[in-house]
Image (spheres, rainbow, N blue to C red):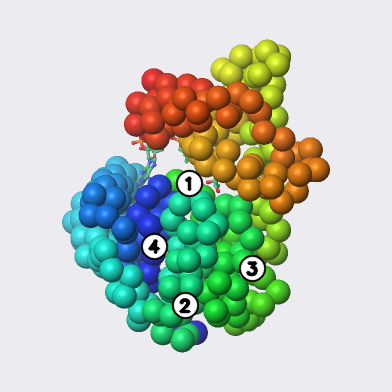
Amino acid sequence: MEIKKVGVVGCGLMGHGIVQVAAQAGYEVVVVETEQGYLDKGLSRIEKSLAKLAAKSVEKGKATAEDAEAGRAASWGRITGSLDKQDLADCDLVCEAIIEDLEIKKALFAELGSICKPDTILASNTSSFPVSVMAEASGRADKFVGLHFFNPVQLMRLVEVVRTDATDPAVFAAAQGFGKSVGKAPVGCKDTPGFVVNRLLVPYMTQSLLMLERGDATAADIDAAMQFGCGHPMGPITLTDYVGLDTTLYILEGWVERYPNEPAFAIPEILRQKVAEGKLGRKTGEGFYKWDGDKKS
Ligand code: 3HC
């Protein structure tokens, strides 16, 4: 099962990063969006990120300016944007990174199942939905995996490779191989809520918000405690802002619906309030903190 051409559906926060790491690893990549504006925005993020990484590799003495520029241009040249899903037909692997809405994802996979060539591997970057449900909808459950990347995809080393009971072991192995080839450490996991990371991380983030809600400590102190006490790169409240408060809420709501008696999935009122106010974290410039681009202001 050789993967040469990769398709990505969605060029948002996660999708643009997946496109970029695949192109950097030498794959031809087609990325499909629903509107030209979204596509342009995602491609421009990739362009900036590639330029930044090229500049950094020169700064760190890892490449000459000439080699870094050649690498940047080659990666960029391997990416094609499209508004037409038919352009995914001959991809060897198609990874979905669209909105976290199970019905929309199921409809997309039903469509991809009929558009893509029979041996195309289909993958979802879902954070929290059952992979088996999307696999079923695609009509090719044996060729379906979860490929869960982490934000920012360009910098985070992990990809969770999720197998369902129906996943063909050769497809699972090919997906793990793909993860490795794009410079990630693939971790295999079963199709359980949140897989490994989010099953641990989201309840941790939630507990930090409940702590804030109770007034046990300030947001800055909770974050400093975990940064300096446990060596985390970001404290949990900064991380919730970074991931997106809406995304965190969607994840929790999906779990609560399926596991209403699991106390670890409790939703803090403070999270609902922020989302209702449109304060979604870094992406809107304000969540629990104020943000200026990627940095807290
Ligand atoms: N492309 C290129 N460069 C980038 C970049 C990108 N996408 N994103 C950041 N950078 C650059 C920054 O601009 C910065 O450059 P500079 O040194 O020239 O200023 C450099 O990378 C390092 O960034 P920072 O200065 O912000 O320094 P950090 O050392 O703090 O690194 C971080 C940033 C890697 C994001 C680090 O803070 C971190 O690991 N945070 C935790 C992130 C995390 O936990 N992610 C997982 C979220 S959970 C998830 O995704 C699952 C989902 O399903 C919910």
Density class for disc 3 (Cα within 10 Å; few <14, some 14-19, many ≥20) is: many
Q: Is residue 84 visible?
A: yes
Q: Amino acid at mark 3?
A: Ser
The quadrant the C terminus occupies is top left
* Count of numbered badges drawn on the protein: 4
Q: Is residue 261 toward the left or the right of residue 6 in the image?
A: right
Spatial separation of the CA atoms under disc 3 and disc 2: 14 Å
Q: Amino acid at mark 1?
A: Asn
x, y percentage for residue 165? Answer: 70, 74
x, y percentage for residue 220? Answer: 56, 17
Disc 2 marks which residue? 113
Density class for disc 2 (Cα within 10 Å; few <14, some 14-19, many ≥20) is: many
Q: Earlier in the sequence, mark 3 or mark 2?
A: 2
- Write down which quadrant ligand 1 falls in: top left
Q: Earlier in the sequence, mark 1 or mark 3?
A: 3
Q: Is residue 208 visible?
A: no
Determine the residue positioned at 80% across, 43% down. 261
Label 1: element kind:
loop
* 196 vs 252: above or below: below
Density class for disc 1 (Cα within 10 Å; few <14, some 14-19, many ≥20) is: some
Disc 4 marks which residue? 9
Spatial separation of the CA atoms under disc 4 and disc 3: 19 Å
Q: Earlier in the sequence, mark 4 or mark 1?
A: 4
Labelled pair 3, 2 in contact (Cβ < 8 Å)? no
Disc 1 marks which residue? 151
